[in-house]
Structures are given as structure tokens and as C-alpha cells.
Image: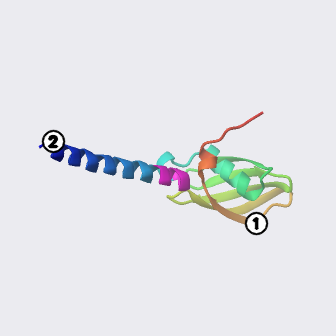
Amino acid sequence: MWWTGVKILGVLSAVLLTLAFFFILVMVTRPALLAGVSADDLAHSLANTTSPGGGSNCRKADDGEWTCWFAGQSGNARYRLEVNWMGCWEASRTETLVGEAPESKSGCIELGDVIRIDSD
């Protein structure tokens, strides 16, 4: 009788371990699925994809598209971003304010964009 309890406990443990592994896998590869898309996460993703030394600021429009202002070493520009359900985005430059900026970029929000350790 006790052996049946051990088997049930083993199966439940395996299921919980599998779910935990799946959660960690999704969080590492596509955190926007679990955490959602925020302006800060998207801005960080755009800034690091466009130029590692740049900064960005994003806002969501009423139609669901995002507008981001990017300030990098090579120039300042405004981008329109379309973000899909997985947190991947495509940016197209709508305006160059100063200098040179890439015409279009694409990327995905990654774990480093969601969980950041900023040091001053």
C-alpha cells in the first residue's frame, strides 16, 4: 500500500519538476510571454540591439504600436515598433533627429532586458 503512495509522489514530483523547467526555459528565452511587454523592457532591448552605448525611451500608442526615441553614439532617432505576442519586435525609423541611425532593426526582449542590474 505504501508503495502506491511513493509512486504517486514520484509522478507528482516529476510533473512539478517538468513544469518548473518549462517555466525557467520560457523565462530565459522569451520572458515577455510571462512578464508582458513594458516600455522599459522594450526600450532596453532596442537600445542594446541598435547600439550597446545607447539609451532609449518608449511609449505605447492607442493603436497598440510602440514609439521609441533612441539616443546613441551615432545619432538620435525615433522608431515605430511592432511587437508580437512573443516579445519580438521590428523597428522602422520614422525620423532622424541628429546624426546617423539604422533604418530598421529587429530583435526580441530577452531576460537581460527584463531583469537588469544597473551599477552607478
What is the x, y in percent for residue 37? 55, 49
Q: Main secondary structure of the magenta part?
A: helix
- The residue at 48%/49% (across/down) is 24
For the residue carrying disc 2, how many other residues have a C-alpha within 10 Å: few (<14), some (14-19), or many (20+)?
Answer: few
Whether residue 57 sits left or right of residue 41 in the image: it is right
Residue type, numbered disc 2: Trp
- The residue at 69%/51% (across/down) is 68
Residue type, numbered disc 1: Glu
Q: Nearer the viewer, residue 93 or 15?
A: 15
Q: Nearer the viewer, residue 48 or 43?
A: 48
Quadrant containing the C terminus in the rendered view: top right
Query: From this viewpoint, which residue is outermost toward the left?
Result: 1
What is the x, y in percent for residue 44? 68, 48
On the image, which quarter does residue 89 sit in? bottom right
Q: Nearer the viewer, mark 1 or mark 2?
A: 2
Q: Secondary structure at mark 2?
A: helix
Check disc 1 and report the residue beneath it.
103
Q: Which residues are magenta?
A: 24-32
Marks 1 and 2, Cα distance to the nearest angstrom?
A: 67 Å
Quadrant containing the N terminus in the rendered view: top left
Q: How many marks?
A: 2
Report if residue 52 is visible in the image.
yes
What is the x, y in percent for residue 92? 69, 64
Query: From this viewpoint, which residue is outermost toward the bottom?
Result: 103
* Residue 28 lies in the magenta-colored region: yes
* The label number, if any, that marks residue 87 in the structure image: none
- The residue at 47%/48% (across/down) is 34
Query: From this viewpoint, which residue is outermost toward the top?
Result: 120
What is the x, y in percent for residue 98? 86, 55
Check disc 2 and report the residue beneath it.
2
On the image, which quarter does residue 39 sit in? top right
